[in-house]
Amino acid sequence: MTIADGGPDGWSGMAISGLAGAAAALAVAVLLTVYFRTGYRSTRDILRHGLAAALVLGLLAFAAYDMRHAALAYLGIVLAL
């Protein structure tokens, strides 16, 4: 399979991975914006915000890991552990 075939190691695989991460991050950003603009904050709300922030950080870490993996596959670099 060549790069032009559009396999998972080609340019299209990396582009799809990046677009999926961007779409997920945008969806989370919109939801968090709506959530944080609501009124009064109780202790329960503060815990929810902390959980939401942890979720966003996890999503960003996953997107960075996925893009790194896709970029290394595109370049043909294999990392031995």
Image (cartoon, rainbow, N blue to C red):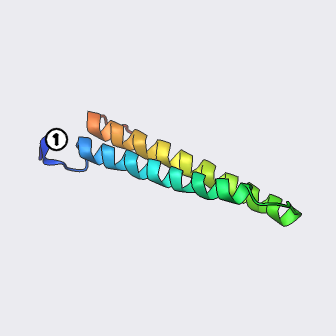
Q: Is residue 59 visible?
A: yes
Q: In the rendered view of the protein, which quadrant contains the C terminus?
A: top left
Answer above or below: position of 16 versus 71.
Answer: below
Answer above or below: position of 67 versus 59.
Answer: above
| Nearer to the camera, 68 or 24 | 24
| Nearer to the camera, 41 or 76 | 41
User: Would you name the residue on which mark 1 appears?
Assistant: 3
| Nearer to the camera, 76 or 13 | 13
Image location of residue 23, percent across then percent down = 45, 52
- Residue 13 vs residue 44: left or right? left
Within the image, what quadrant is residue 47 found in? bottom right
Q: Amino acid at mark 1?
A: Ile
Q: Is residue 9 visible?
A: no
What residue sits 86% from the left and 61% below the top?
40
- Residue 71 vs residue 34: left or right? left
Most extreme residue toward the bottom is: 44
What residue sits 13% from the left and 42% below the top?
4
Image location of residue 76, percent across then percent down = 26, 35
Image location of residue 68, percent across then percent down = 41, 39
Image location of residue 43, percent across then percent down = 88, 62
What residue sits 55% from the left and 46% below the top?
60
Q: Secondary structure at mark 1?
A: helix
Number of numbered labels in the structure image: 1
Answer above or below: position of 15 versus 53.
Answer: above
What residue sits 65% from the left and 55% below the top?
32
- Residue 57 vs residue 48: left or right? left
Mark 1: few/some/many CA within 10 Å (<14, 14-19, 20+): few
